[in-house]
Amino acid sequence: MRWALVKVSLAVTAMVVVAFAVPLGLVIREMARDRAFSGAEREAAAIAPALSITTDREQLERVVASVGSDDAAMAVHIPATGDAEDGIDIGQERAAALDIAAVRKLGRASTTPVTGGSVLLQPVAIGSGGIAVVEVFVPEAEVSNGVGTAWAVLAAVGVALIVGSVAVADRLGVRMVRPAQRLAQGAHELGEGRLGVRVPEEGPPELRSAAMAFNSMADQVVQLLANERELAADLSHRLRTPLTVLRLNAASLGEGPAAEQTRAAVEQLEREVDTIIRTARDARPQTSAAGPGAGCDAAEVVRERMKFWSALAEDEGRTWRVAGADRPVRVPVARADLAAALDALLGNVFRHTPEGTAFAVDVHNGDDAVIVLVSDAGPGIPDPDAAMARGRGSGSDGSTGLGLDIVRRLAESTGGDVRIGSSVLGGTEVRIWLQLDGRAAPERRGHRGAVRRRRPRGASRTFNRSRSLP
């Protein structure tokens, strides 16, 4: 493309220069010729008054010497008159006798080429009634005086125009070709797996649009791959719920080779799941908000998941409570995502608190947000900030960190957030703030007071071991 633009510019500029420079050069040459012969006509006209007065040779020679710029450049031819048999010729004669006779007969000026230039033959009437002919020699150098310089200037201007147009075309070509080359190189690198490659959005509007589309496509590819990795990690993490059940059941098998093999297999399976989660979590995707009309009934999901976990709670002697799940509570998240978040939090309760520790799930429905509280009466979390940081990383101390990450992404997809604090039961309280209108969650404040103000009437604070779910 670059060389094509240069060739086109070269061809167009050359045609323009030829179209204007050649006629202009011819005009300059004609102007120089006219200037030279105009000077000769002035010299011939200057001697006409003397010829009308006298035909004396000596006087005419003095006049010719005073008028002509060069003694050899002018000649006067006076015809014979009266008793004189021969005419008078003053100066060097260059024109042929026939040309002189023709001018005298026709009575008008004429130019005739001669050796070394041209001569102007100007007829002049004399006092005796005859016609004299003044001959003025115009050298070829005077006819072409300044023409060569003018043509050289025109040629220099033409070359400068051609060079300038080629340079401008080359710069324009570079401005067009470089973004296209960068776009092609970026596509090649992206095809090789370099997902971080991006191209500058510069150049002509069309190439800027193509660069923007490429960068958007690259972002989408990275997002899709990150979502795939996160999905693999998420699905693997959901396996930990049935693994927790297997681990608890295996713990109750007592002693014996079969029991030991079962517990070893469960531990091995948990390690493999953790490995899968850590391997899959190479990048964190950004969860997008649910579309219009999407969502689920949070109360129904809470009742369903508590029904699942209640069997394990009875086996371990845990008291539990559910509040606020007796009427529909719509939230803008997918049912499976909310269930996964609840399973992650309840699984942490069973995994990190001693058997017999009470726990509770509260659902608070406000005008602009829904708050889900999962609290327990365990030892609590000494450093909630570190726990949230682990939820954003790869985890440590036997934890993948994905449980809190699932909960956090669920809340942030609605504009809400997740916070960890101390519960009224004396242990840990995890608050999931699900924003209903998509606005950002409020700044940190005493949310416990807000929760108490919104606590549904009749919400029991007592724990019943075998209480049925609403």
Image (tube, grey):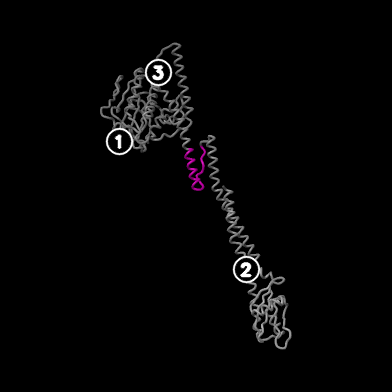
> What stretch of residues is rendered in magenta?
196-218
- Which residue in the structure is indicated by mark 2? 30
Residue carrying label 1: 367
Q: In whole angstroms, how far apart are the C-alphas of marks 1 and 3?
A: 40 Å
Is residue 203 covered in magenta? yes
Residue plotted at (65% across, 72% down): 36
Of the pair 237 and 465, the residue shown nearer to us: 237
Q: Secondary structure at mark 1?
A: loop
- Tell me where residue 330 sits by quadrant: top left
Q: Is residue 306 magenta?
A: no
Name the mark nearer the viewer: 2 or 1. 2
- Which amino acid type corresponds to the residue marked 2 in the rendered image? Glu
Mark 3 or mark 2, whichever is nearer to me: 2
- Overall secondary structure of the magenta section: helix
Q: Is residue 61 above or below residue 270?
A: below
Q: Give the class, few, some or many, for how many residues have Cα within 10 Å of label 3's Cα (few <14, many ≥20).
A: some
Q: Which mark is residue 248?
A: 3
- Quick one: quadrant of the C terminus? top left
